[in-house]
Structure formats: C-alpha cells, structure tokens
Image (cartoon, rainbow, N blue to C red):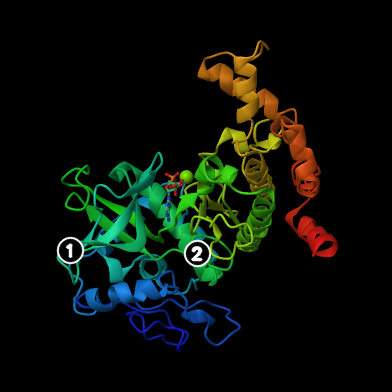
Amino acid sequence: MNSTPPTSPFTEVSDGAFPSISKNSKDFTYHLPQKRNTTSASSHLVSPVEEPTAKFSEAFQNAYSTKVPVAGSETYLKSDLNILFATPRFYSADNLASMFHLPRTVAASEFLDEFLMGILLAPQMDFLSNSDYTLPSNKLVGQGGYSYVYSISSTASSTSSHDLSFVLKFAKSQHKSKVILQEALTLAYLQYASPSTGDSHIIPFYGLTYINKSHFRRLRSNECVPGLILPRYEMNLYNFNSTISYKLSLGGKRKLWWKLLTQMLDALKTLKGNGIIHGDIKTANILITETPILDEGNCDNFDFYLADFTSAFHISQLPTDLNTTVEYCAPELIDNSSDHVPTFETDFYAVGLCLLSFISQHEPYNELQALVSHGSSPGIGSSSIQQSQWLINVLLKKDPINLNMLRSDLFQDWKLELALLSKVLVGRLSLENFIAILENDYV
Ligand SMILES: Nc1ncnc2c1ncn2[C@@H]1O[C@H](COP(=O)(O)OP(=O)(O)O)[C@@H](O)[C@H]1O
Ligand SMILES: [Mg+2]
C-alpha cells in the first residue's frame, strides 16, 4: 500500500470490484481502477496519475487538498467519450473493454465510462476546478498540427506564478479534441498494462484536464478542449541533432547513441508486448529529459523518452486514417504491394532511421535532397509534389544507410553501429532477433 503517494486522492483500493461513482455526491473522487491479473501485491496500485515525481506530489500538497472539485472536467470528458465511440477511426467501446479486460457482465457502457474516467482524469490538476493553474502565453514549448504544448504554471502560494515541471498538450480547437483523447487512451492503457512506463521510456502520462478560453485566449468562448498533463522535458532529438550534437566529441556521441538504442528498444518492447503501434516514430517525437552536459564521460543525467502517441493504435483496431511522416516510412508503407498500415516492423525501422539521423546529424534523406537540388543532377523539381515523388523513389531504393551517410569518415567512425543498423534497416531483423544478437554479441 505504501506505493500510493501520500498526496494522491486515490487512497482506497477495493478488492476485485470496480469503483462506483455516486452522481449525486458533489465531492466524489475517482478511485483507482484495478489492474487485472496482477502478480505482485502492489502492482495494481498504479494509475496514470500514480507515478508522480517528488515535485509532482509537492505541487499538489497545498493546491489540491484544500479544494473540492466543482464543475470539473468530468462532464466534458463523458460527453467527448460518447462522441468518440460513435466515430469508427477511434477506439470503439468494445475494443477498449477487451483491451482493458473489463468484465462484460455489468451494464457495459456505463461501467466503461466510469472506468475510463477513473484512469483518464487528473483531479489533482483539474484546470476547470482550480484557477491556480495557468498556461502563460510566453511558455509555448512546442506545437504540431493538432495541439499546442505549454508549460504549466501555478499561482498557488505566491503572488507571481511559478513554473511546475509539467506541460499541457491540448487540442488547438474542439474539432481536434478526438486526437488528444485517443492519445490519452493509448497512454493510459500503456501505463495501466505496464505500470513502469518510466523504465520503458514511454512518456509518463499524469492525466487529462479540460481547459477553456480563460486558460488560453485563442479558444472560442464556448470551447472547452482536453489536454494531456505530461512531464516537461528539455528538448526533442530533432533539436538535439541540429543544435547540440556537433559540440560533442565522437566518444561522447557514441555513448549517447548506445543509450538511445537501448532506451528505444525498451520502448519498442513495451509497445509490442501490449499490442500498440506508435505509427509516427521520428526524431521530433523522441524527447530528452535534460540537455546533456558536454562532458563526454557522463551520460547518466538524462534519458530519452518516446512521445507523441497521436498516430498510435492498438492492433485489435486498425486505423482508417493514417498520419505518418514520409521520410521515416519503411518501404512497404509506400510501395504498391501492401495495405500501408504501420506495424511493429515499421516502428522498428523508424527507430533505426532515428539512430541513423543521430549519426548523420540530419533528418533522413535531407542531405541527399539538398545535394541533388543544389547540384546539377536532374530528378528533383521544386514543387512539393515533385519533391514527395523524389523522396518516394529514394525510399524505394531500400538503401537507407548509403543514402544517408554521405561522408566516408562516418563509415570508419561508426563501423560497429552502422553494421547493427544494417541488420535493422536492410536485413529487417525482428525486434526479438535483434535484441538476441545484441545480448549475445555485444554485452
Ligand atoms: N513533455 C514535453 N516536454 C517538452 N516538450 C514537449 C513535450 N511534449 C511535446 N513537446 C514538444 O512539442 C512538440 C510537439 O509535441 P508532440 O507531442 O510531438 O505533438 P504533435 O502531435 O502535435 O506532433 C514536440 O516535438 C516537442 O518539441
Ligand atoms: Mg510530434
């Protein structure tokens, strides 16, 4: 029992039965859902909001314990889940019930809603019921097509706001809420099925809150959108490759490469073990906890985490609408012979390309593209259609190592690493076989 953090409102875990929520009670708390088929006595005590860092607990000590949630995010979540279940691209209710091994004997949909609310919401950090949390407009840390990522600040216990070590990744508009909810469901599922997601180098998920115009003024006055509470990391691998990497010595860089390899293999093992395909692995979606100290002997003070599960899905429910990045596609995702759905193998291939990018310090095929378009070689035009066609033709050559390692010294400096990457990118070994080779020959 002592693995429950002292400040968590989830202190009671009933044995066997799923929690019920009294709708007339104003001060109900969501109870911790049970992980089924647990082997250790305490492993069921983990929820998406349950692996908080010490800072996370501290942050809530004052803020949450004295406040009773009023008109919080649960109403919005409930309504959004219903909309989500009506749309085929996203997890269906049946699909989720079977992923989470929920019993089918009870009034299924009501029960599923309660269960999902329990693992998705973050009552400790509900922006709608606690006005201390803010998203200062100068604290944008990233954005994509569907979402903004802002640092979370708190005005609690001081007049000026101070930054917490969290970000909120929220939908840019209500239209885009489903993508965030789908991501929340995938992350909550992974954390539920594999509680130590920190060890597996998948970004921890602290729960979901809704926000409105009072938190982010670009929302419309009637809009209320969901956001994921995530730990705040320092940068992504894309930025690292372009701004930090060249400052490191070869020895230091090589140590980081091996760390990236082992941590991404851990992430892939967890994904595969739980039937989740990420679908958009690339350098911009791998986050680094701290800026590595430019001291080549030391790489213990930071880690890599796989993030951005907006394209992820469970193998039991194939997506109908795909959103991947061409440069990172394995050839079978773009040739004419297959159905173009990402697989465990295409995720592994994309990790291989990230490791190749780490060596070249360029995004896949970027250098080649620059070379061809600035030189006299024909074949690449200026329109974006011509460029995509050029890229597709290049990918179909199935020679990613030679087409990305344009400097011959890289083959000498990274001989061992490139031989390994060749097994992934050309030999197309399975994850299991690759790990076996690594353990037998390199450890
Ligand atoms: N937890 C985080 N800490 C720091 N930066 C983040 C975090 N999450 C996302 N970012 C930044 O925001 C960018 C977009 O986030 P991401 O999750 O990839 O969203 P999208 O689905 O819109 O691509 C990332 O590439 C990264 O630079
Ligand atoms: Mg992204």
Q: Are marks 1 and 2 in contact (CB under 8 Å)?
A: no
Q: Name the residue nearer the viewer: 138 or 254.
A: 254
Amino acid type indicated by mark 2: Tyr
**Quadrant position of residue 332:** top right
Percent position of residue 349, x then y: 68, 45
Percent position of residue 69, x then y: 20, 71
Q: Is residue 332 visible?
A: yes
- How crowded pointer 2 is (Cα within 10 Å; few <14, some 14-19, many 20+) is rated as many
In the depicted structure, whether residue 345 falls above or below residue 198: above
Percent position of residue 23, x then y: 23, 74
**Quadrant position of residue 146:** top left
Residue at 38%, 64% (x, y): give it: 207
Location of the C terminus (image quadrant): bottom right
- Residue, disc 1: 131
Q: Name the residue nearer the viewer: 140 or 159.
A: 159
338 left or right, relative to 385? right
321 left or right, relative to 20? right
Residue at 53%, 81% (x, y): give it: 43
In the depicted structure, whether residue 1 falls above or below residue 209: below
Residue at 76%, 49% (x, y): give it: 417
- Residue, disc 2: 189
Q: Could you say whether the residue bearing mark 1 is in a helix, strand or loop?
A: loop
Q: Could you say whether the residue bearing mark 2 is in a helix, strand or loop?
A: helix
Q: Is residue 101 visible?
A: no
Q: Name the residue nearer the viewer: 152 or 309.
A: 152
In the depicted structure, whether residue 41 falls above or below residue 62: below
Amino acid type indicated by mark 1: Ser
Q: Name the residue nearer the viewer: 43 or 406.
A: 406
The single residue placed furthest to the right in the displayed view is 441
